Image (cartoon, helix red, strand yellow):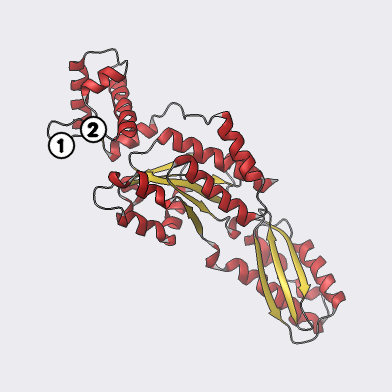
Amino acid sequence: MSEDRRLDVLRAIVEDYVATREPVGSRALVERHSLGVSPATIRNDMAALEDAGLIVQPHTSAGRVPTDKGYRLFVDRLATVKPLSAPERRAIETFLEDAADLDDVVDRSVRLLAQLTHQVAVVQYPSLRRTALRHVELVPVGDRHLLVVIITDHGRVEQRTIEVPDPLDVGTVARLRVRLNTAAAGRRLAELGTALSDLADDFAPVDGPLVRGVVAVVEDTLAQESEERVVLAGTANLVRGGGADFARTISPVLEALEEQVVLLRLLGEMAEDEAAVSVRIGRETQHEGLLETSFVTTGYGGPDGGGTAVARIGSVGPLRMDYPGTIASVRAVARYLSRILAG
């Protein structure tokens, strides 16, 4: 019972500190929470939590605040996640369903999440490596130029123009379009090399340069590292609402958020976590600029944002964040985003 009660005390300290931004003392816990024990017992529990490294006293004669370790235990022991209200759910659905294309969906999602959490929202573009090919369109542009349009099953569109040595034959282009889509449509992009390797054998030798040129541009496009990118919104939220949470300055946080490689590394590592919603707290981010932040992410593009997710969406905020509310918002936007992309 003592262990359970101490967890209740820790939970109360985290909740009060998130709400008030002030260190939490035993008297405040007695007044605000029905813990069912005396102030002396609560003080003993706080001393035990401090000895365990879960809370710390920032100033002499002050209350206590959670440590990274304390936040981690709080998150790991969350029994419930604060549900979104019906108006919030309707607003998410309405806002995202009006999107015109993938770029618009991503832009709306990141802005919406930033508004819901009042933190920095991060959305990773669907990775070409984890999606399937929906269609390849070939559009002649003049006699010797061909526009190759690659469309994935999650609506991502890549366009490239190639130059061919001989004038284009409309009939050959049409046949190549059919053969290309028959061989490749519905396949994961990592499988396309094998599927397209013998495509030139189905055409006359004179058409070989055209076929090989189209296959090469498709493979080269899908192999490019530049496909991996993230979109941010709400960085001003950290300055407005979270500036006081950063003991040093907010500059290292903003600088870290500007580094796409840092965010992509974190998103990649968090994709390996077993939990449906992954939370990295403080030093767990393993980046000097993010030591005073927490990162909450989940996958989208698969069932309930899990399993076959093609990318991740998340929120970055100070250690003193509303973890249940942030988790709920990230999960909800990810689910609606998955639904829109699957539509």
Q: Is residue 318 above or below residue 83?
A: below
For the residues marked 2 and 1, what is the alpha-carbon distance in whole angstroms? 9 Å
| Image location (x, y in percent) of residue 26 | 21, 22
Q: Is residue 204 above or below residue 321?
A: below
Residue at 52%, 48% (x, y): give it: 111
- In this view, which residue lies farthest toward the bottom? 165
Count of numbered circles in the view: 2
In the rendered image, which quarter contains the N terminus? top left
Q: Secondary structure at mark 1?
A: loop
Which of the pair 275/67 is nearer the observer?
67
Q: As shown in the figure, which amino acid type bears the numbered disc 1? A: His
Q: Secondary structure at mark 2?
A: loop
| Image location (x, y in percent) of residue 155 | 67, 55
- In this view, which residue lies farthest toward the right? 171
Looking at the image, residue 61 sits to the left or right of residue 75; the answer is left
Q: Is residue 92 above or below residue 138?
A: above
| Image location (x, y in percent) of residue 179 | 80, 67
Residue 23's tag is 2
Residue at 80%, 71% (x, y): give it: 176
- Residues marked 2 and 1 touching at CB (< 8 Å): yes
Q: Which residue is mark 1?
A: 59
Residue at 74%, 65% (x, y): give it: 136
Asked if residue 214 shows in the view, the reply is yes
Which of the pair 48/139 is nearer the observer?
139
User: Could you classify mark 1 by the number of other residues whose Cα lies within 10 Å: few (under 14), some (14-19), or many (20 or more)?
Assistant: few
Q: As shown in the figure, which amino acid type bears the numbered disc 2? A: Pro
Residue at 31%, 57% (x, y): give it: 251
Q: Quarter-wise, where is residue 152 in the image?
A: bottom right
In the rendered image, which quarter contains the C terminus? top right
